[in-house]
Amino acid sequence: MSYLVGIDIGGTFTDCAIVDRAGKLLTTKVPSTPADFSRGMMDALDAGAQALGIGLDRFCRDIAFLSHGTTVGTNTIIQKKGAKVGLITTKGHEDAIHIMRGSRGYGGRDIRKVVHFPETSKPQPIVPKRLIRGVSERVDCFGEVVVELNEQEAETAIRSLVQEGVEAIAICFLWSFRNPRHELKVKELVKRIKPGLFVTCSFDIAPKWGEYERVTATALNAYLGPVMSGYLGKINDSVKRLGYRHGLQITQCGGGTVPVERAGEAPLLTLDSGPVSGVTASMFLGAAMGEKNVITTDMGGTSFDVSIIHDGKPAYSFVATTDQYEYFLPRVDLQAIGAGGGSLVRFRPETRTMTVGPDSAGAFPGPVCYGRGGKVPTVTDAQVVLGYLDPDNFAGGRMKLDKKSAEEAIGNLAKLLDMKTPECAAGICRIVELQMADVIRKVTVEKGYDPRDFVLFAFGGAGPAHAGVFARELGVRKIVIPQRRAASTWCAFGAAAADVLHIFEHSEIMPTPVPAKRINDALEALEKKASQLMKKESIAPGRQRFEFSLDVRHRGQINEVEVLLPFARLPNDFEPRLRAMFTEKYEKLYGRGSALAGAQLEFVVARLRARALTPRPKLVSSRSSTKTVPSKAKLKARSIYWSDLGKFRRTPVFDGEKLATGNQIRGPAIVETADTTVVVHPGRTLRLDALGNFEITFKS
């Protein structure tokens, strides 16, 4: 056999998805190991081997494609455990990273924070001022060298930073993306003076103008470099020793994977790559179902992540924010809030209300019902009290839940609110569900999309329990819980289904009218660079796919929109068609009539997404269908509290893995799989489709 394997490390669990040559999907789930995440990955591989009934070394030898999504980079930033970074920049511009932007990541979000943001609230510096060195050099906006690099100053700066004990050096000069000669020279000096020291250049990480965002991206990449390169090297060596003969791939935030060597050089690409894999998997399934408009929702133990797929393409963004720092990073657009199964519930005495999240109980100690020492109730505890979760059959029976402790913890909270315990538990779920509906509106309604034109994919261990409420709130056409049991490991499946992806950008302001040749020259240079890299990675031309786009704006504005090109090179009469495409997208974002008809435009970034097609999983469609529910799929009914009814009610429970294609379950009902629970509320109907997905529809 040859297997496609995806592994995704989350804050609570590490998931493994295995697809064999026949298209059969097998999933496993093990606890994450925050002290050493590489151990959790190897545990997941071992669990997969055991599920297949073979040894770990045999399993690794039989893997055709291994892709890994990780939160190590994200956790490093959150926990502020990155490397000690030195920064070398153009003399006179040493303070850009400390000045930041005025809104500091809050622009367009909360006007009170934008206008009244005190200086004292600035984050801990990525690079303290004492570790920043300015050197004499200057390149102008056309890429011409105005002042030659002072190599003696550069060498002095490097030696002083090495003496300070830095573990990584970031290099960011003005306009270096137009001519990287000076950055390359300083990088060469670093390698000569201190071999083995992690060094990163801005032209390789963020080749765009915007000095602050570029220097931030470069500094963050250096901050993550030593931690991530050590971690990735460790797991790469481990799987090689076990017999894996192909290159390990690491998922990246742009919607594909990169070789482990590239991820080690540019660990910034791995931020948010785990949730993005869920979008990749949803694109794959949506195409198989004929659904081009999909809202993806991923609720795990720690967070709730949302994205959209419109007309078969994911939404993209190009500026990210971490801890108030804004930086350039081409990525699938995700919105995330701290709302997961482990989100902590607290009482606010001043308002006599309760809050849910954003902080989480994590894997340890976890929710109160886990019996690991947790004292603060969580969303999972509320689900146990309501009866959604079976305490004796949680995680496929691998774990027993302490229902009594959960009832006691939520009961204490209910007394403070003058509520009954089940009412309080239902209120907790309602709060988190409305928070989810609100963040979904931000990626749909606020971006010009109508949720009623979409289907909603609900995955992650906790998502299918709540989707019936927040999806109804939004008015989507239907809910899809993908591939039954695999819903809880959907991001791992996405890692296994992802293509290799490299993103190349060329930044140059080109105001209209502009000859097609000028833009085509830029596109051709990007394609040449991509072809050379893919050849180096032994990717055959037949596997290569190129997708070009341009960032366009009205002249005089600073915000641009990306226009995907329907051709690899622009025809001579391209402008009217491209202007119409720009206007359509611009007005979708900013409102009908907002585009300035006939105004001068500027093309500011040419972009190439270069993909290498990888082996794809096969989705096997069932040829038979029946409405008769197999008797073996019917489990013991249990008492569930339904807030719509305001009382407990004896409710049928089904084993989702034993339901047959075509089966329909009318709510209220509970459908269980080994790793997730689907709550079918009153007024909803669940059906198992031919591809093995649960579909939930609403009464009209």
Image (tube, rainbow, N blue to C red):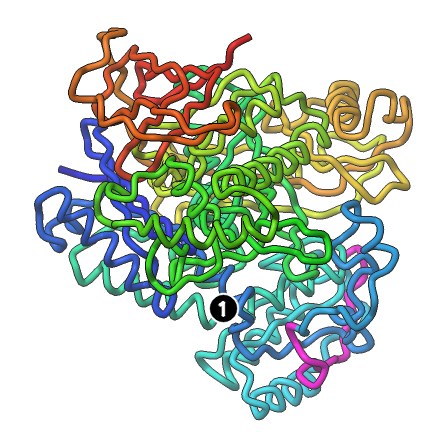
Does the magenta run of residues contain 220? no
Q: Residue 333: x and y, percent?
A: 60, 40
Residue at 84% x, 33% y: name it.
601
Viewer-nearest residue: 362 or 87: 362
Residue at 55% x, 83% y: name it.
166
Q: Is residue 172 above or below residue 362?
A: below
Q: Is residue 485 above or below residue 376?
A: above
Viewer-nearest residue: 345 or 94: 345
Q: How many discs mark residues in the rendered view?
A: 1
Q: Is residue 399 above or below residue 572?
A: below
Q: Circle 1 sits on which residue?
A: 225
Q: Residue at the left extreme?
A: 54
Amino acid under label 1? Gly
Mark 1 crowd level (few <14, some 14–19, many ≥20, 10 Å Cα)? many
Residue at 59% x, 47% y: name it.
337
Q: Residue 657: x and y, percent?
A: 24, 27
Q: Residue 530: x and y, percent?
A: 50, 44
| Left or right: 428 in relation to 463 | right
Viewer-nearest residue: 630 or 490: 630
Q: Is residue 612 visible?
A: no
Residues rendered magenta in the picture: 126-143
Q: Residue 533: x and y, percent?
A: 45, 49
Residue at 57% x, 31% y: name it.
308
| Left or right: 242 in relation to 164 | left
Quadrant location, the C terminus: top right
| Left or right: 229 in relation to 392 | right
